[in-house]
Amino acid sequence: MKASYVKKMAMQAFNKLVEAVEAGKSETLIEYLKTMAKFHNYSVGNAVLIGFQKPDATHVAGFRTWQKLGRHVKKGEHGIAIMAPIVYRKKIEHEETDDETVTTFKTVHVFDVSQTNGRPLSEFARVKGDPTDYTEKLKAFIIEQGIKFEYSDAIGSAEGVSSGGMIRLKMGLSAADEFSVLVHELAHLMLHKDRHNMPKEKTVRETEAEAVAYVVSQGVGLDVNSASSDYIQLYNGDKTTLMESLDRIQRTASEILSGIIAEQGNIQEEAEGQSCLAEAA
């Protein structure tokens, strides 16, 4: 595939992404954020307790919170025990000082979404479509870069993780999500493998990786809808973040596209060239 065609394709997709981010949060993202606000950020200790008792937990909340979300705990389900802080003031006698604040803990029980029934939770926007054989071409490209790849059910709630020249992907993703997540993690390894030179801000790193995923997914014909722009805004990325990383995003996306759709690019270029000749005649 000629570099000019790849660059044109990548730039067109990038411009669409910038427009989507500039348009602000989508209704899907707004509803998702409203729902997620109902869930607590548990302490490290409680996160360990939850993981030990229910390793496959994804969204955990108390009995009443689930009711507010339009769901109810299934009959016979056993709660996940965590520690909840209780703060109270203890009066100090015979001293002219403020009362002492005392914190103790008690055991409370929470439940994972899989232990409940009811109204579906608002979900994050998903990539749609069929990547056909592009996923296999992408995997081959990943291996050519000297990067290892494996499926894993031990990466927590993440859909994909990458580090040390290895990509681990959650099992059971849809075909479109699998492709998009693979590109996202590949972009991290290509752009951020040098810890001394990679952007320090997580916002920039995630914006770059997701922008590459958007451009490449668009390039193979997937419907990315608001998934990538929502993801970028979730990490506080914006048009400025995108524009400052334009060269890095375009270069990385073009390299991946060149590696997986060379034949299609040549065919498209020939078609465009024939169209131009016909118009000239």
Image (cartoon, rainbow, N blue to C red):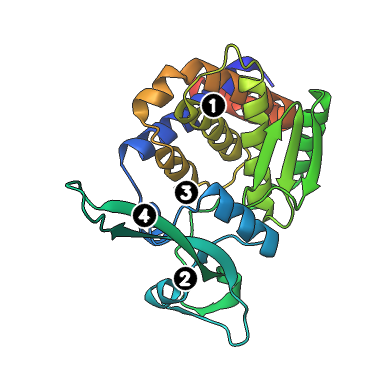
* Location of residue 133 by image quarter: top right
The CA distance from mark 2 to mark 3 is 33 Å
- Comparing labels 4 and 3, the label whose residue is closer to the camera: 4
The CA distance from mark 1 to mark 4 is 58 Å
Residue receiving disc 1: 10
Residue receiving disc 4: 102
- The three-letter amino acid code for the residue at tag 1 is Ala
Residue receiving disc 3: 225
First reached walking from the N terminus: tag 3 or tag 1? 1
* Tag 2–tag 3 contact (CB < 8 Å): no
- Taking the spot 52% from the left edge, 61% from the top edge, the residue there is 83
First reached walking from the N terminus: tag 4 or tag 3? 4
Residue 106: x %, y % from top left: 49, 66
Residue receiving disc 2: 62
Residue 217: x %, y % from top left: 59, 39
Q: Quadrant of the N terminus?
A: top right
* Location of residue 259 by image quarter: top right
The CA distance from mark 2 to mark 4 is 24 Å
Q: From the viewer's perspective, is residue 32 above or below residue 163?
A: below
Residue 199: x %, y % from top left: 51, 19
- The three-letter amino acid code for the residue at tag 3 is Asn
